Image (cartoon, rainbow, N blue to C red):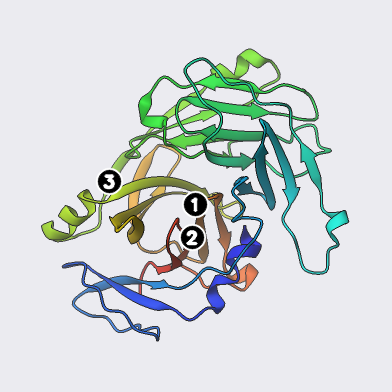
Amino acid sequence: MSLLLSRLLKTPALVRHLTARSFSTSFSKKVSRTMINGDVGYIEFFKYPHDELMEDPGTIGSSQGAVATLKEGIVCLQEHPKPNVPDADRKRLSLPPLVTLPHCQTQIVTNVALSSFFPEEEDFVVAIKFLGPQLSLCRPARSSEWTNIRITDPGFFNSRVMYSKKDDMFSMPVSGGSYIRSWNLGEESKDIHKHKVKQLRFLQFPELEQSAWDLLNSCCTSEHLAESEDTCKTFLVKWYTKSNFRRKETQRFIVFKIDEKGDAEYTSNIGDLTIALHSKASAICVTASWRDRTPNIILFKGLHDSGTAHLYD
């Protein structure tokens, strides 16, 4: 995913200013950094580079540099194409056939998360969150079967799963983001049901006019967990979109920094970090200066738009 999103910064952009007083929209072919009426950031919109593999209807997700496809009940992983790397040299792995739990479905996938992409390692784990109650995990080097979990809380039916290297667990935020559930594929199959719950306490929110909150309340909201492996910081990103003639258009991102106690504090400054969100990929958070990226931004690719959200000007 990082290879895909690194290309976003090279494309001419359209600019939508986000103001603390209201959500005024002014588009330009040039990037403007002028503060207008208390601006707290802006979004650059541009066309996402064509990616044949990610746009394939059979592609269900991407994580840790691997692309997952689903065909006839079989999930296959393959390393994302890289420049100067022959196709025959890319890592590939077929996973065991999926098993659908009662009152669940395994055709529509919310997202895929991997602990890494080293199929030869015993601790390599794949997690797939399906739309609805089912979450499935597999450790291919140790088992030829999936470990399937039926989640009873409907607040998680649309949630996206993330692998936390810090906790060595797969985590999901509930709709609205008030708490997080985490699972670890332990040595015994029964261990998977010993999940953890972290209640979040939102200590601070952005200062917006009521009209701005009214707009956000009319939007569709998705919650995304992103963890920086370099700094061990965890963020909850709320992505607000609004339907417009069958298109979902990005309106705003709100970022909360989460600590070990579950305190969630709004921030417009994530420091020397870049968060990347993709409708078909797991969220990632990387140190910008180490990878020649712009800091304190969110790179995003939604269903119908894409661009860069600058959290603070």
Residue 123: quarter of image:
top right
Q: CA distance from mark 3 to mark 1?
A: 28 Å
**Residue at coordinates 47% horizontally, 17% vertically from top-left?**
103
Question: Where residue 189 is drawn, which disc sits there?
Answer: none
| Residue occupying the far left of the picture | 210
Could you tell whether 188 is left or right of 135 in the image?
Answer: right
Measured as percent of width and height from the top left, residue 185 is found at 64, 25
Q: Amino acid at mark 1?
A: Ser
Q: Residues within 10 Å of mark 1 (few under 14, many from 20)?
A: some
Measured as percent of width and height from the top left, residue 28 is found at 34, 83
The quarter of the picture where the C terminus appears is bottom left
Q: Amino acid at mark 2?
A: Lys
Q: CA distance from mark 2 to mark 3?
A: 29 Å
Q: CA distance from mark 2 to mark 1?
A: 6 Å
Residue that mark 1 sits on:
279
Q: Residues within 10 Å of mark 3 (few under 14, many from 20)?
A: few
**Residue at coordinates 44% horizontally, 47% vertically from top-left?**
224
Q: Amino acid at mark 3?
A: Leu
Residue that mark 3 sits on:
203
Q: Are marks 2 and 1 in contact (CB under 8 Å)?
A: yes
Q: Secondary structure at mark 2?
A: strand
Q: Secondary structure at mark 1?
A: loop
| Residue occupying the far bottom of the picture | 30
- Classify 260 as above or below 245: above
Q: Earlier in the sequence, mark 3 or mark 1?
A: 3
Residue that mark 2 sits on:
301
Look at discs 3 and 1 and give the one toward the viewer.
Answer: 1
